[in-house]
Image (tube, rainbow, N blue to C red):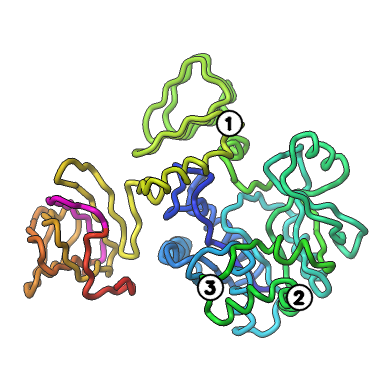
Amino acid sequence: MKVLILAGGVGERLFPLSRLKYPKQFLRLNGESLFQKTVKRGLMLSDDIYVVTNVDHAFMIERELDEIDVKAKILTEPMPKNTLPAIYLGIKEIVKDFGRSKVAVLPSDHLIEINENYLSAFKEAEKLSDKFLVTFGIKPTKPHTGYGYIKPKERVGGGFVVERFVEKPDYETAKTYVESGYLWNSGMFVFDSEIFFEECEKYAKDVIEKVDSGRYEEIEPISVDKGILEKSNRVAVVPLDIFWSDVGSFDAIYEIMEKDESGNAVKGEFLGVDSNNNLIISEGLVTTVDVENMVIVNTKDVTLVCPRESSQKVREVVRALRERSDERAEHHITVYRPWGSYTVLEEGDGYKVKRLTVLPGKRLSLQMHYHRSEFWVVVKGTAKVTVDDKEFLLRKGESTFIPMGAKHRLENPGKVTLEIIEVQIGDYLGEDDIVRFADDFGRI
């Protein structure tokens, strides 16, 4: 069996922790990121790991894999188009490398606690995939309105034929589903590549033709559930009796975190007076008085406050910010780049102060700016600097000035991380004031 991990999601539902350029799969709720936890679960099934992501996140996937010393083949979508095109793209690559294969498909942003049922369920699914497209259904622990449901029919092998898929219900309907033996739709699958391609030909021919011909931008976003599984009569479900969460809202995060004696789930510093059953995630001290059942998320640039029961609406905030072209919907004050990252420390009228972090052996593009000059001070490591036709080294405590309009480049030639304080001066300091002449990451 091969493993295909889907890591092309965008960060809307957990804003401001996640952003469009820093989506949910990279969040570290408890040590490793959700993506890294998924990779390690995948390694329990196969040594052959494939990851489908988008162009913006490919370098972050590489970095995440390096941290846990895992090799995987990374495939990039030109743009996110939901799960069906991504799965087709991934399985097509696996078949090119290995021929007909059994493929376990795993979302990269779920939280799962492994038990003995996990591996045995995948073994049963692998057997069933000789004849069926196999999905996994989580045995519900309670009625839940945030998940889709699967209704099983007659038993087949270690699972059941799927009678139907149903959308997220209201609470009373969810109660009926749980009492009737429905399962939560986990978004995990095992597909035989040949059967998957056959069903794609029947139900999603337009999608696969556009993927095959390189017309990705023409594809209408569509999930594998909508595009294939809800239409096919060759779908089975294997029950999974494990702890599982899609971490799809702040209320879901509240459910999985440990609580204090007042029912508060806290990450960060919190002081509450007569405050109960709240989710508090903060980079600074949060204090509350007589507050109950609320979400309070405080990052360095955005604070979110909402009732826990309304946390599904957070994506509406993100969409409103995008409509007004607010960069805070896109990224945090720390922005990750293939060469490292930068953090905005302070900005005002005509100036901006950043901390640049350049990884060993990496360099920024050869570039120039029309509207700003820059002053660099090295605070850690050694910098190799190019300014027009000059090239020189700067060590800790040394500095240089980059005039407006000068071609320049910053490189870390050393074995330790390079940190630079950059002061920008100019009438326009937007990130789009950049002309690249050479770039190691193909961004010209």
**Mark 2 and mark 3: Cα distance apart in space:** 20 Å
Q: Disc 3 marks which residue?
A: 216
Residue at 58 percent across and 31 percent down: it is 308
Circle 2: is it few (<14), some (14-19), or many (20+) Cα within 10 Å? Answer: few
Q: Is residue 81 left or right of residue 296?
A: right
Which of the labelled discs sits on residue 308, or is there none? 1
Q: Is residue 71 visible?
A: no
Which residue is more in the foreground, 80 or 410?
Answer: 80
Count of number-bearing discs = 3
Going by the numbered disc 1, the residue's amino acid type is Arg
Which of the labelled discs sits on residue 202, or is there none? 2
**Mark 3 and mark 1: Cα distance apart in space:** 38 Å
Q: Earlier in the sequence, mark 2 or mark 3?
A: 2
Residue at 80 percent across and 67 percent down: it is 232
**Mark 2 and mark 1: Cα distance apart in space:** 42 Å
Q: Where is residue 384 shown, x and y percent of the image?
A: 15, 67
Going by the numbered disc 2, the residue's amino acid type is Lys
The quarter in which the C terminus is drawn is bottom left
Going by the numbered disc 3, the residue's amino acid type is Tyr
| Numbered range of the magenta stretch | 415-431
